[in-house]
Amino acid sequence: MKLYNTLTRQKDEFIPLTPGEVKMYSCGPTVYNYFHVGNARPFIVFDVLRRYFEYRGYKVTFVQNFTDIDDKVIGKANDEGVDFNVIADRYIKEYYVDADGLGIGRATVHPRATETMDAIIDIVQRLLDNGHAYLAENGDVYFRTRSFADYGKLCHQPMEELQAGARISVGEVKEDPMDFAVWKAAKPGEPAWDTPWGSKGRPGWHIECSAMVNKYLGPTIDIHSGGLDLTFPHHENEIAQSECANGCTFANYWLHNGFLTIDNEKMSKSKGNFFMVRDAAKEFGYETIRMFMLSAHYRTPLNYSADSLEMSKASLARLYEARSNMEFRMEKAAGDTMTVEEAAKCEELGRYKQKFIEAMDDDLNTADALSAIFELTREINAYMGAHQDATRAWLRAAHGLFMELTGVLNLVQKREDAADPEADKIEALIAQRAAAKKEKNFAEADRIRDELAAMGVTIKDTRQGTQWSRA
Ligand code: AMP
Ligand code: ZN
């Protein structure tokens, strides 16, 4: 498999540290709000990367963090007059509601910064001990950027150019404008942790990821990923800290997804040009958003518009329709052995699997992988149409291949009837109810059940998940 590596600026053959295993880390959300459709892009594409590795037989250890302490979390807590933990707990729960709806699997570990404080303090102490960091007079700890000769290797900018952009503002206590905070001394009223170097405070954002990678995956990992905007300074700083603390390469492959845009501008909270996943799901359905995200290669910009979402919704409906036709025919058909002609056709269909794998092996090209799935679907539909007597054995094989490939992308796997005009909304509510139940919030789960009942929908919880039907 080839992956575009920001570090080398080319598609590199993926060679894991340990044969058959992948250690990957992706920067997760800062939990002070629901996440928007732009944030959903890395969560979805790196979930697909992980699923694809698993499909190809790798054992994957995947870590995605929650940044649960930072200025924005504290700001929101102060606005509401509650503890910062209340805010973080709330939006971690809400993250899972949307992630479940979007078909994003749970990472192996989802560490929170505040639960990793020992590892954070340990790495800061090591940087202080070996002279790559220093304690400033106000209690902040700064990374001595010039002490790391490779600084700038990820963003491919020489130190002098990066320096031109750096400034020391009034009241700052850094030795050099390039230095950045790894530890921030406590301000009155802010949450703070004790440290061996004596200044109570909280971690900088970059050190958090360095420490979590180290704690859960070790000093060197295969893949580190995140949105393109994280390349500099966040990932550059993660590399500097980790490599200076551990004396070895931090990550072999750096993957960055392109921006989700709106009117061709990056979707972002600060610009206000965003849609919460929650709201977009009410309009188009969670699975449509996933389909939309995978319709483009992850490194290209992708523009969000109602038209493109409608198109993705229609594509998804076509796949569901093909699936339900196959299942209907499978139920009715006879014949547990394929005819000679069917066996030949079956073998022919195998070339779409080949195409799918080639696309995914080429830097996770989900757009081409989806094309292979659509071609496969067209072939199956055409064959079924022309052969009303197709055997159950053939239908099973075709259906199996279809479910296998769509399954890698985690699309078209739901059992519910997607032809219902309100299917998307119903599925969104069912996902939110399942999450509420998982959190033991039974009042909310019951409220959602009532809302569904008012829509004329009855639900049945089964071992395979929640089935619904029109009353
Ligand atoms: P944040 O919660 O802001 O730290 O962002 C979480 C993730 O979303 C990071 O990997 C960001 O790079 C990514 N991200 C934020 N905005 C966008 C966007 N418009 N398109 C793609 N990725 C984004
Ligand atoms: Zn990070």
Image (cartoon, helix red, strand yellow):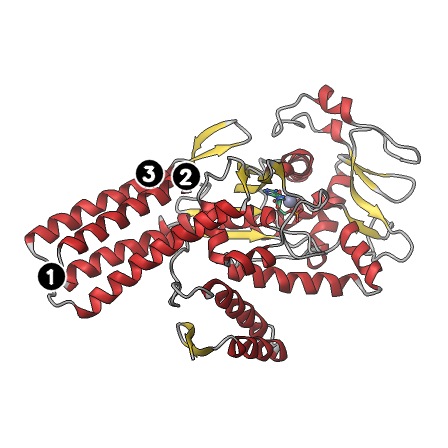
Label 1 CA crowd tier, 10 Å (few <14, some 14–19, many 20+): few
Q: Name which residue type carries label 3.
A: Glu
Numbered tag placed on residue 389 in the rendering = 1
Q: Amino acid at mark 2?
A: Asn
Whether pointer 2 and pointer 1 mark residues with C-beta atoms closer than 8 Å, the reply is no
Real-space Cα separation, disc 3 to disc 2, in angstroms: 9 Å
Asked if 283 appears above or below 271 in the picture, the reply is below
Q: Position of residue 185 (x, y in %)?
A: 86, 48
Q: Earlier in the sequence, mark 2 or mark 1?
A: 2
Ligand 2 image position (quadrant) = top right
Question: For the residue carrying disc 3, how many other residues have a C-alpha within 10 Å: few (<14), some (14-19), or many (20+)?
Answer: some
Q: Which residue is mark 3?
A: 358
- In this image, 135 relative to 253: left or right? right
* Secondary structure found at label 2: loop
| Residue 272 appears left or right of 311 | right
Residue at 74 percent across and 62 percent down: it is 87
Q: Secondary structure at mark 1?
A: loop
Q: Is residue 54 visible?
A: no
Residue 225 percent across, percent down from the top left: 56, 42
Q: CA distance from mark 2 to mark 1?
A: 36 Å
User: Which residue was labeled with disc 2?
Assistant: 365
Under tag 3, what secondary structure? helix
77 in relation to 446, above or below: above
